[in-house]
């Protein structure tokens, strides 16, 4: 019970902090919104309604990915700069249970971005969302958000000793949009890139969103999405302990 | 002579400090990986939509990325001085403001040019696009003019950063405006009229148009008008930036907010 309370308090507190930050609260919505606009402007040139709908569905989820890349990569660094990293690491609460609610708070902002992009596309491009299976579609968005938060968890612990992780996080933004098939069909990518796409949980989440929108069953894609996401969580939990231990042993935790 | 020294030595030192003494862990992802991945993203969007060819997206996005050093570096230079608590010292020094700030802009212009050229060369290589060898000298020149113009808007943003602290958010917003309005991924002629009108007043629009024409085999005489317009727009932003720096420096001194973080 106390663990659940800690997770909820941490999640709520971090969400409030992020919502008042122009960089995280505003830009994490505005940035993918503008990239979605740029992609849809390209699709609009040929005025193909099917292609527009295809891109519109994927574009809606771009913000969930954005919510994690730069922010999750800088999560540990921000604690370091604030001088609270040692306190967090030394606290009796396992480090993973501090990081997880933060990445879920980031992903929640990504959900806000989904709604913003759907409304924006409707208003600007006259592109209403046509979805045959709404429960499946909503579940697919939630699953995509959940697994991207787990990816953020993995990313944040992996870069714990990388002092300029924000640069790496920013560099992951466009490859993620491309490899996960948010606005480009995976069939267009070169064959060597496909294994990378399959290893990314959002690829399956976006496929489930499209299957639901078309009225097909999203369950197989959702199952793979969840499986890959849980693999991220397991890897992050394993890596997190080792990397933090290593940083403590070498007394490099607080080095900026 | 002092102004010349401030221009070159001050500008170079500020630029080196900007990247934490040329830390490759920042420099490589920011200025090398970024343009290549943005080019790939939109080239594939273009392929999926059946719009344009790879060369169109390579040039648009490589030049768009030239804006990143131009805008962020100028903004972060001032923000960095503030964080290091040296902004007050810099601004109370008797150094003339024009060489002081233009000196900081010069390495950034070169960086923007290098970033865009790396983007074009690697985009052509990765996507197997075809730009004739005879076009490259003119492309080098036009891209340099585009980078100069973005440094102009960077000066304006640097000035705003004297009174508005969140340079990262501001830089991203302006970068996104340039992405949408300058014909980076959709020719300005295909944009709605009001968007085209806004785009024509922004840096990069004419440089992107000119570079695409050159890559398609246009001669200097065919693009000289576009290049001159880009240069003019860039110069206008430089003048506006220097005036804004003067005014906002005065404002931040009057309100004692210069070093407020």
Image (spheres, grey):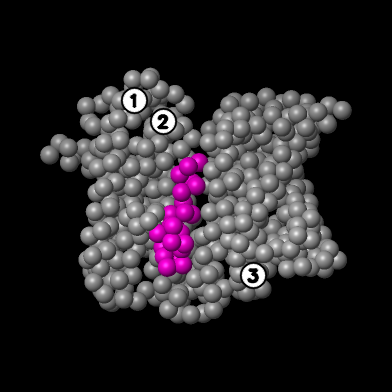
Q: Front-most of A196 and A3?
A: A196
Residue A86 makes an appearance in the image: no
Q: Do discs 2 and 3 share a chain?
A: no
Residue B29 makes an appearance in the image: yes
**Residue under pointer 3:** B187
Q: Do discs 3 and 1 share a chain?
A: no
Q: Tell me if residue A37 is in the magenta stretch.
A: no
Q: Position of residue A68 (x, y in %)?
A: 39, 48
Residue A100 vertical placement versus B17 (above, below): below
| Tag 1 secondary structure | helix
Side of A223 relative to A182 (left or right): left
CA gap between label 1 and label 2 equals 9 Å
Q: Quadrant of residue B162?
A: top right
**Residue under pointer 2:** A161
Q: Which mark is residue A246?
A: 1
Residue B80 vertical placement versus B59 (above, below): above
Q: Front-most of B13 and A119?
A: B13
Q: Position of residue B165 (x, y in %)?
A: 55, 39
* Magenta stretch secondary structure, dominant: helix
Q: Position of residue A137 (x, y in %)?
A: 28, 68
């Amino acid at each position: 019970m106390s663990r659940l309370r800690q997770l909820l308090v941490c999640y709520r507190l971090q969400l409030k902090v992020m919502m008042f930050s122009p960089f995280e609260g505003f830009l994490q919505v505005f940035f993918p919104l503008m990239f979605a606009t740029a992609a849809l402007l390209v699709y609009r040139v040929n005025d193909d309604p099917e292609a527009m709908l295809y891109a519109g569905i994927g574009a809606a989820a771009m913000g969930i990915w954005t919510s994690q890349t730069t922010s999750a990569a800088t999560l540990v660094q921000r604690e370091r700069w604030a001088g609270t990293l040692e306190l967090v690491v030394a606290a009796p609460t396992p480090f993973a249970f501090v990081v997880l609610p933060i990445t879920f708070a980031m992903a929640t902002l990504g959900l806000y971005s989904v709604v913003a992009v759907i409304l924006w596309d409707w208003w600007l491009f006259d592109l209403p969302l046509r979805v045959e299976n709404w429960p499946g579609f909503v579940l697919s968005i939630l699953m995509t958000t959940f697994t991207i938060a787990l990816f953020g968890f993995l990313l944040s612990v992996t870069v714990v000793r990388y002092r300029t992780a924000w640069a790496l996080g920013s560099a992951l933004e466009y490859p993620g949009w491309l490899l996960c098939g948010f606005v480009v069909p995976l069939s267009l990518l070169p064959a060597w890139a496909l294994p990378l796409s399959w290893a990314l949980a959002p690829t399956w989440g976006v496929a489930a969103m499209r299957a639901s929108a078309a009225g097909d069953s999203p369950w197989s894609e959702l199952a793979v999405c969840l499986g890959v996401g849980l693999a991220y969580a397991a890897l992050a939990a394993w890596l997190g302990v080792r990397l933090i231990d290593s940083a403590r042993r070498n007394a490099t935790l607080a080095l900026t | 002579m002092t102004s010349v020294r401030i221009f070159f030595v001050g500008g170079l030192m500020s630029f080196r400090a900007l990247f934490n003494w040329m830390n490759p862990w920042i420099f490589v992802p920011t200025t090398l990986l970024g343009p290549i991945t943005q080019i790939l993203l939109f080239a594939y969007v273009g392929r999926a939509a059946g719009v344009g060819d790879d060369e169109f997206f390579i040039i648009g996005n490589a030049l768009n990325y030239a804006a990143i050093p131009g805008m962020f570096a100028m903004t972060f230079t001032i923000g960095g001085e503030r964080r290091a608590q040296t902004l007050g010292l810099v601004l109370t020094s008797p150094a003339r403001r024009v060489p002081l700030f233009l000196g900081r802009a010069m390495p950034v212009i070169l960086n923007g040019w290098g970033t865009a050229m790396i983007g074009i060369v690697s985009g052509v290589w990765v996507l197997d696009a075809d730009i004739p060898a005879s076009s490259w000298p003119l492309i080098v020149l036009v891209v340099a003019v585009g980078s100069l113009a973005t440094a102009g808007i960077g000066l304006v943003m640097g000035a705003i950063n004297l009174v508005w602290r969140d340079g990262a958010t501001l830089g991203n917003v302006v970068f996104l405006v340039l992405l949408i309005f300058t014909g980076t991924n959709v020719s300005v002629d295909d944009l709605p009229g009001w968007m085209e009108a806004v785009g024509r007043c922004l840096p990069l629009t004419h440089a992107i148009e000119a570079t695409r024409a050159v890559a398609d085999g246009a001669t200097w005489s065919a693009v000289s008008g576009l290049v001159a317009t880009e240069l003019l727009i860039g110069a206008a932003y430089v003048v506006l930036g220097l005036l804004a720096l003067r005014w906002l420096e005065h404002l931040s001194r009057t309100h004692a907010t210069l070093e407020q973080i």
